[in-house]
Image (tube, coloured by chain):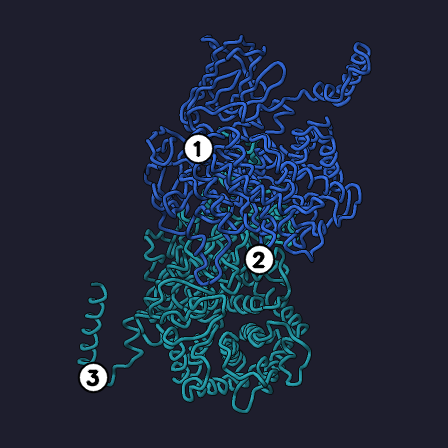
Chain colours: A cyan, B blue
Amino acid sequence: MKHFFTSLWEVIFLFSFVFAFGIDSFTHEWYILFIMNTYICVPFYKTSLTDGFWKDRQKLNADVSIPNVYKRFKETDRIDCLYPKWKRPLSRSDRFYDSDTAKWLEAAAYVLHTNRADYPELEKLCDEVIALFKKRQQVNGYLNSYFQRRPFLPKFYFRPDHELYCAGHIMEAAVAYYQATGKDALLNVAEKYADHIRKRFMIKKNTAFSTPGHEEIELALYRMYDATGKEKYKDMAEFFLNMRGTVKEKTYRMFNDAYDQHEVPVRELTSAEGHAVRAMYLYCGMADMARVSGDKEVLSACKRLFEDACKKMYVTGGIGSDHNGECFTIPYDLPNNVAYSESCAAISFMMFCKRMLLLEKDGRYADVIERIMYNNLLSSTSLDGKAFFYENPLEICKTDLTRSRTIRKKPRLPQWQRQEVFGCSCCPPNINRTVASIGDYIFTENENEIVLHQFIACENDALCVKTDYPVGDKIVVRGKNYGKDLFSVRIPAWCKKATLSLNGNLVDAEPKNGYVTLKVDSGFILELTLDMTPFFVKTHPLCKENRNKVALQRGPVVYCLEEKDNGDLAPLAAVCSGPFTEVKSDLSPLPFIDVVGKELTADATYYQNECSAKEKTLRFTPYFTFANRGESDMKVWIPLA
Amino acid sequence: MKHFFTSLWEVIFLFSFVFAFGIDSFTHEWYILFIMNTYICVPFYKTSLTDGFWKDRQKLNADVSIPNVYKRFKETDRIDCLYPKWKRPLSRSDRFYDSDTAKWLEAAAYVLHTNRADYPELEKLCDEVIALFKKRQQVNGYLNSYFQRRPFLPKFYFRPDHELYCAGHIMEAAVAYYQATGKDALLNVAEKYADHIRKRFMIKKNTAFSTPGHEEIELALYRMYDATGKEKYKDMAEFFLNMRGTVKEKTYRMFNDAYDQHEVPVRELTSAEGHAVRAMYLYCGMADMARVSGDKEVLSACKRLFEDACKKMYVTGGIGSDHNGECFTIPYDLPNNVAYSESCAAISFMMFCKRMLLLEKDGRYADVIERIMYNNLLSSTSLDGKAFFYENPLEICKTDLTRSRTIRKKPRLPQWQRQEVFGCSCCPPNINRTVASIGDYIFTENENEIVLHQFIACENDALCVKTDYPVGDKIVVRGKNYGKDLFSVRIPAWCKKATLSLNGNLVDAEPKNGYVTLKVDSGFILELTLDMTPFFVKTHPLCKENRNKVALQRGPVVYCLEEKDNGDLAPLAAVCSGPFTEVKSDLSPLPFIDVVGKELTADATYYQNECSAKEKTLRFTPYFTFANRGESDMKVWIPLA
């Protein structure tokens, strides 16, 4: 019924519009804006971060993380393998080396876009790398260091071998670097490569597969379309999205067709399945399609996939719980100690949510972004900025490794310490580019309003946001010749007590879909106070692993227990009440939280009454600070006493 | 200090004894009986089971299980491979086929020992099989159908290949069949083989290893010694036990030396390690050694190992939680859905406890035996007697198999339905022989007293026990010209309210080490009533898997929830209170138990307050009845609400 009415209104609108203004005045874009009620992003480069939590992290990212990733990429030949004569043997993962380098370039581009003057050396490095890409490109436009080093391998023949995935990342880097510096060398390379791909896949159709084994090019092509306005890139993106699930394709022998999402056409997808990063990059492309083409079936699919992904998401925002194929599993299947929860997967979920926020002002998307930002994303980098997690476990228990003392082979568990580089090193530059462009997640806007999604101290032409959130509880937004009627601010779902005032007057408004929308004047001052009292959260009862366990949160920040602060974690139990004592931490601006729990013991394996328990103060530290003080057991989910 | 005093008393005793009676009157056995305060077993064949729970199970075992195992062994060439010319290709496990056949023979011998007249066909089958063994034996005494079929393989060269394990089972069967029927054909074979083994290992010492890769021969040699009185068998057993851990031996590449218990000498063992059946068979041999030789160091090791094994035991009595090597892991590591908990391992734990009861009147041994008898052991056979579990999971959750929907390879889980035969089919005949000789576990005695350990309706020269335990709560013991001063009865540790009366007078006595010992007359009547109200048990808090979960027990019988009775088990939760409603069951004489629990639901993946819960009556069924009505999810440990 709902669908019918929506359609009916559309038809009435269409006719009224054409009747009132004549057929010529009706454009596709107009139509889409009307029926989709869409927003546009206020990009990171139009808003500068001011002092505060994220400004510090961006500086660490630019000054330490990005140079360190370059250094390790250089040492592992990821850059130099672009030299045509490079002969040194490379690792098994060299088929996606180009994507690693391109993602690093993209991250560097974001740094240059906001702070070009401060990083001349970085720009020089970028230009060198871009020159390598340019030199490596074949006359016909083809560009892939792995396949070009192996001329006997046919091109676009091995579907799982990431050719189009690498191409997509080169395109993203090209757009970013062009927008940051105005230099078009890489954009020209990307356009030439895109044309070659178009020729092979869409015109000559002489490739061994029709859709990439690892999605990425779809969203990259929409970026090329957004940046250049060239329709052919939109057509290419639509081609790859529409072909998906309609033709028989090959995948890895150990997985079925759901692994790389070619089981059914995209409009028919109902649950988040398969390799989590592949899936989310696809959903990003689908959300772009819904935005650009106004395809409501794709939009419905995106909404279904978001709903389902939320049931497969860790409290830290991580997704893809199974290391086998880095895959989604079933709803609420969220093991803690073997959590795969790849950094790239969480980032790709942020990317999808960002796109969904352009289609719907629904706070759930921004809530997920916030959950990931302050937990999985932050945690994936060491506090010194040098090392990264690929997998992000929610529990470390050293005895998991030695429980079978007679077996030589150790069980498969996530790494417990961050690494500077990985064989498959997709995550470090992905983290780099996300932190460098975190400003992308703050605002969206349309003609009438600006929407504040994330509470980051920043300033742009229209607004100034002052806050030390998530350390502090206050967010002050000031209009600067604010030229729109409305301003919307998100009230996070975790917050049970928010106080809002506009120009000094208390506002008593229930948030709608997660936002309070206010009529404002051009110099308005809005003050939002979010209750930062720590609280315990529980997981859906169908999550076997977390039944009768709680996790501590303070604002959006999930906390954990570390052995370093608490001794052996195995006998500890939480009591679901405060008081919570905040203690200054030397690890981050967020405090430790002390709360009384219990230490349990029993004198029999099985017993009928209560076990012995004594009071014990549990010291919680933010999850993102864990594993920064050497090896230590860790737990996010604490059993109740 | 304690050790010193014990030794001092021994010395004083020794001198007084020699002083009083002269040196000749002092024998080794006397000395041991004094210092060890030992008991002897009242063997099953001296006590006939009368109507009741176990009588029915023994009849099913004799009439259905034992013939069915023979049939499947015949079909899988386990019997016929003893023909010298047998050429049909056999399975990978044919290296221990002889032990399967021998264990079946042993089970059949027990049936004949108590009911020979009723099973003439069975005796005929046994004689045929024994003839095959006899014919197969080499002139020098060697006997192993696997190695004899492969004459190019050297004998006693491949330590992990079960030669001495098979030899041990032939010896056990030989003793059992000789004692049951008086026929000594197999005993002669066993003795000849034992002599050959002695020659190779102890005299010529020309074998590639000194101790068996799979223990069993040690306890079997003590049985040969007990049955024949020949010292050489005792010496052989001591040889194998004393060599263990003192010489470098080979084991499987994937395991370390703890896997088959040759890391340290037996007297230094401190924790139950490695392959659970191997370990327990070794501990049986050690307990026999302590009994026969009075070796107190070995006795101490046995006690330490028992303590540790109790921390590694499922509530059903299962041990060896890891399928990797069928091994013990660390204390309280008791996963439910992947529980290995092999039937043979639980049985071997019973065997060890039975031997410990000869050394110490400590109810904990009998409690473990009872836990295994009514749970792991009973559960391992289908209610129709035809099929068996090798592994005994404590949870079945079908979605465990399909949680990774994109991965073709299924995860390794225990089988969810009982099988008639396995490739490695050690368990079925082991179950057969244990049920057939369950009477072995009822009594021990010494000069002054008889001790009642297990409540089984039975009768022998001295006593008559009437009970329908564990269905009913009453046990009546009547003396029949009872010629001893004392009678002891176990009060199970699970029972919080036991009422005891002697000749109609209420007895108010606290149990000591699990037993109440009473001075009795020759025709005494003792009535014991054990409170059978169901109760919930919990696991030690260091058991990660079972934190905040409960299991339901009624007497010694552990219960479980089946999907068949309750629908989807995933959202169900237990509330730690009654009332418990007993409902007649068509599966077994034990009732179903209905108790109000909760069904939980939530509308978010993460939430701060309580989730929604509605009352739901949970129907529990005895664990041993599970998986008898087709495939169904099952849970022993139920999360608390």
Q: CA distance from mark 3 to mark 1?
A: 94 Å
Residue that badge 2 annotates: B87
Circle 2 marks a residue in which chain? B
B271 up-or-down from B91: above or below: above
Marker disc for residue A22: 3
Q: Residues within 10 Å of mark 3 (few under 14, many from 20)?
A: few
Badge 3 and badge 1 in a common chain: no
Of the 4 image quadrants, the one containing the C terminus of chain B is: top left
Residue A4, quarter of the rendered image: bottom left
Q: Tell me the crowding category of disc 1: few under 14, some 14 to 19, or many 20 or more residues within 10 angstroms, Cα based.
A: some
Mark 3 and mark 2: Cα distance apart in space: 93 Å
Closest to the observer, A610 or A330: A330
State whether residue B464 appears in this view: yes
**Circles 2, 1 touching at the beta carbon (< 8 Å):** no
In the rendered structure, which amino acid carries the disc numbered 3?
Gly
Residue pictured at 43% horizontal, 47% vertical: B417
SS type, badge 3: loop
**Toward the viewer: A549 or A103?**
A549
Q: Can residue A179 be seen from the camera position used here?
A: no
Question: Which is closer to the viewer, label 3 or label 2?
Answer: 2
Q: Secondary structure at mark 2?
A: loop
Q: Position of residue B214 (x, y in %)?
A: 65, 44
Q: Is residue B122 above or below residue A276?
A: above
Establish whether labels 3 and 2 are both on one chain: no
Using the image, determine if residue A343 lies above or below residue B571.
below
Q: Give amino acid for label 2.
A: Lys
* Residue to which mark 1 is pinned: B59
Type of amino acid under label 1: Lys
Q: CA distance from mark 2 to mark 1?
A: 36 Å
Label 3 with label 1: CB-CB less than 8 Å: no
Single out the mark in the foreground, 3 or 1.
1
